[in-house]
Amino acid sequence: MNPKPLVKLNPMQSTSNYTRDRCITGIHGLDEILRGGIPHGSTVLAAGTCGSGKTTLAMEFLVRGALAKFPESCAHFTATEPSIKLLENIRQYAFFDMKMVDSGKINVFDMDVLYSWLGLDKASFDLDDVHALIKAIINIVHEIGATRLVIDSVTTLCYKIKSEQLIRDFLFTLGKKLASLGCTTILISEITSATENAHWSSFGVEEAIADGIIVMGDVERMGHLLRFLQVVKMRGTSHSRAKHAIELTPLGVMLTPMLKWGAQHDKTNKVGG
Ligand SMILES: Nc1ncnc2c1ncn2[C@@H]1O[C@H](COP(=O)(O)OP(=O)(O)OP(=O)(O)O)[C@@H](O)[C@H]1O
Ligand SMILES: [Mg+2]
């Protein structure tokens, strides 16, 4: 005889059929890793070492949104390189079309220009400055109706915010307001090491505030420096935590499970001598 349950769940408690709406990244392999995409409205920290492909991945995330069946409006705030340089580099990829920028589907903003507009040409920001910056970013997102946002990088931006508490407030408030606007955000974080024991952020607070953490780095295999991506956390969904190899191809970022890639790579090398 089956034992009777002691407590009967009410419909609100029975959540097994509930799934959160997803922002389908459109990046080859990433939506499978995330079991359907990033939970809508999340703030995701993409933490990676230099040259690991952070900007390319983030830009493709916007491109896929702009090209979706129901096209999304996208915004990219660049703090690490001027927008002209960023676009010059990214337009070499076949997946990117300058028409998306010219038509206003992808809006690229220089953080330096934004600082000038706000009169924030200074080395460090206080509480008022931080609030002015949040307000400006939110206004822009609201104005263009952006539902995908990238800040490249939050590390560069946070260097100007001297206290940990202010950085925490800045990221928490920004994330909350963006989520209320229905915007899914990628915050790029520059890290010096992507090993198991590394921090995924420069200031140690970004990773706690973020809904998700995607780590990008390099592994050396047989004299090759291979790029990898690993989803460390993503609130609101189950996901793979396996390392995946990244290839930056003209058609976009391609992710394949690391072991499989390694096996194929080793086999190819053997065949080729
Ligand atoms: N057209 C291209 N096709 C394939 N790979 C490219 C192409 N252009 C650049 N790359 C590779 O991409 C790397 C840069 O990628 P990306 O700018 O996305 O990295 P990042 O992590 O943002 O770098 P950074 O730390 O400098 O911000 C280059 O170092 C180069 O190896
Ligand atoms: Mg970059």
Image (cartoon, helix red, strand yellow):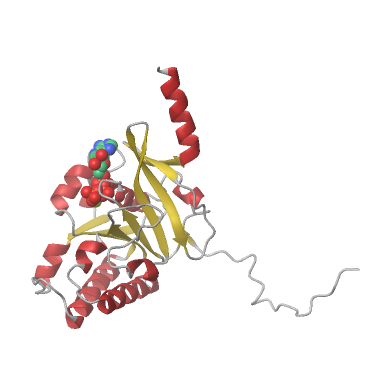
Q: In which quadrant is the N terminus drawn?
A: bottom right
Circle count: 0
The quarter holding residue 41 reads bottom left
Q: Residue furthest front?
A: 197
Q: Residue furthest bottom?
A: 128
Q: Is residue 259 left or right of residue 63?
A: right
Classify the position of the C terminus by image quarter.
Answer: top left
Q: Quadrant of residue 172?
A: bottom left
> Could you say where residue 185 lies in the image, as x and y percent from the top left?
35, 63
Q: Is residue 264 left or right of residue 81?
A: right
Q: Is residue 78 visible?
A: yes
Residue 93 visible within the image? no
Q: Position of residue 212 (x, y in %)?
A: 42, 62
Residue drawn at (44%, 57%), measured in percent from left and top? Answer: 232
* Residue 132 at x, y percent in the picture: 19, 78
Q: Is residue 11 above or below residue 198?
A: below
Where is residue 141? Give x, y as percent.
28, 67
Q: Residue at x 45, y 47 (%)?
A: 243
Q: Quadrant of ligand 1?
A: top left
Residue at horizontal 46 percent and vertical 35 percent from the top: 261
> Which residue is rendered at x = 14% and y = 54% of the image?
82
Quadrant of the image occupied by residue 248? top left
Query: Can you say whether 184 is above or below 84 in the image?
Result: below
